[in-house]
Amino acid sequence: MSWTLLAFSKCFWLTYRILIPIYYLNIPLGMFWTTFLITELVTGWYLAFNFQVSHVSSVCEYSCGTEELTPKLAGEWAILQVKSSVDYAHGSWFTTFMTGALNYQITHHLFPSVSQYHYPEIAPIIMEICKKYNVKYTVLPSFWDAFKAHLKHLQNMGVAGRSVSVHMG
């Protein structure tokens, strides 16, 4: 990415997210900044947790960094998608609505171009096929169970004390 494009995109964000609302909404700056910070923090945390519980978890399998896939995950792309994702709260219309059906993460990965409104009907079919071919399909009862599994993974990583290296290139 060029520095010009980066600078342009940052200026655009600053203009449409901060300058235009301050100028056109004509609300007190204290109210604007309070609302802005609350919405940024809430949506940022909400999205982060929504994405993390489905991928960074003690109940799914995945490979980290640039190392080769572990033998558990070698094989077909679709099997990798199933093993490296976690579903939760399949029976909750509220959770499905609030997450945009991303509580059906496996279905989302296998069929990204299908409307999320169909995920609840597609997931049982995938589960049946996984059962037939002995592929682990992980679905937890609730968001909170998925969140606890996420925290457990973070705790396990902290206890393991593995160093992290970043490969640029």
Image: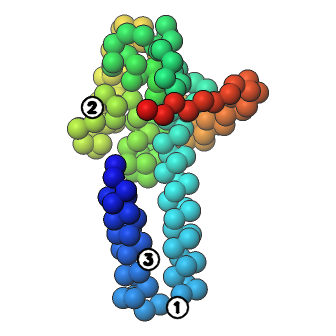
Tell me which corner region of the image, top left, top right, bottom left or bottom right, holds residue 30. Answer: bottom right
Q: Does any portion of residue 55 appear in the rendered image?
A: yes
Q: Name the residue under label 2.
A: 111
Residue 161 image position (x, y, % from top left)? 74, 27
Given residues 102 and 21, the one toward you in this image is: 21
Given residues 121 and 165, the one toward you in this image is: 165
Q: In this view, does 17 lie above or below 25?
A: above
CA neighbours of label 1 inside 10 A, class few (<14), some (14 to 19), many (20+): few
Give the CA distance from mark 3 to mark 1: 13 Å
The answer to whether mark 3 and mark 1 are in CB contact below 8 A is: no
* Badge number at residue 28: 1
Mark in the foreground, 3 or 2: 3
Q: State which tag comes first along the sequence, 1 or 2.
A: 1
Judged left or right of residue 13, residue 125 is: left
CA neighbours of label 3 inside 10 A, class few (<14), some (14 to 19), many (20+): some
Report the residue at 34% width, 31% height from top.
109
Q: What element carries label 2?
A: loop
| Residue type, numbered disc 2 | Phe
Report the residue at 46% width, 28% height from top.
85
The C terminus - image quarter:
top left
Q: In this view, does 147 lie above or below 160?
A: below
Judged left or right of residue 17, residue 44 is: right
| Residue type, numbered disc 3 | Ile
Mark in the foreground, 1 or 2: 1
Q: Name the residue under label 3.
A: 18
Q: In this view, does 138 lie above or below 3?
A: above
| Residue type, numbered disc 1 | Pro
Residue 102 image position (x, y, % from top left)? 40, 41
Looking at the image, which residue sits at the far right? 159
* Badge number at residue 38: none
